[in-house]
């Protein structure tokens, strides 16, 4: 399963991308995360359905600095050959 996730709130300058990366590693997911110019963050995650669902659900947990105001999630086609989760710049 692969999902596209777009979040807004206090998600830049607070370690959110690295929180997402660590969570993805914990659930053995592949994909990427990056900041957007408008202050939002977007990402794609891929893995088992259960792991992706746990990732999406627990993305709000973490540090006291992160605050997600909106989170939209959409299904995507899986990407073949992807082997890691990374932070894009």
Image: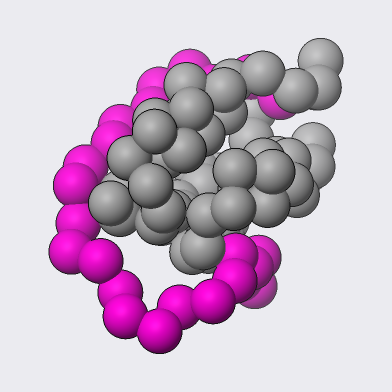
Could you tell whether 69 is left or right of 25 in the image? left
**What colouring method underlies this structural image?**
one colour
Could you tell whether 24 is left or right of 50 in the image? right
Could you tell whether 4 is left or right of 14 in the image? left
In depth, the one of 9 and 64 nearer the eye is: 64
Q: Image height check: is 59 above or below 79?
A: above
Q: How many marks?
A: 0
Q: Image height check: is 37 above or below 57?
A: below
* Residue at the image position 40 percent from the left and 84 percent from the top: 81
* Residue at the image position 75 percent from the left and 23 percent from the top: 62
Q: Is residue 70 magenta?
A: yes
Quadrant, the C terminus = bottom right
Question: Residue 88 in the image: x percent, y percent?
Answer: 61, 71
Q: Is residue 77 magenta?
A: yes
Q: Is residue 4 visible?
A: no
Q: Residue furthest bottom?
A: 81
Question: Residue 10 in the image: x percent, y percent?
Answer: 64, 28
Could you tell whether 31 is left or right of 28 in the image? left
Q: Is residue 59 visible?
A: yes
Question: Residue 14 in the image: x percent, y percent?
Answer: 79, 37
Question: Residue 67 in the image: x percent, y percent?
Answer: 64, 19
Q: Image height check: is 58 above or below 51?
A: above
Magenta span: 66-89
In depth, the one of 9 and 28 nearer the eye is: 28
* Residue at the image position 49 percent from the left and 64 percent from the top: 31
């Amino acid at each position: 399963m692969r999902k596209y996730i777009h979040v807004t709130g206090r998600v830049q300058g607070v370690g959110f991308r690295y929180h997402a990366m660590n969570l993805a590693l914990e659930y053995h997911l592949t994909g990427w995360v990056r900041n957007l110019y408008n202050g939002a963050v977007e990402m794609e995650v891929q893995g088992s359905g259960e792991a992706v669902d746990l990732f999406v659900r627990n993305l709000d947990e973490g540090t006291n600095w992160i605050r997600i105001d909106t989170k939209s999630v959409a299904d995507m086609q899986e990407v073949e050959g992807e082997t890691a989760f990374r932070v894009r710049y």
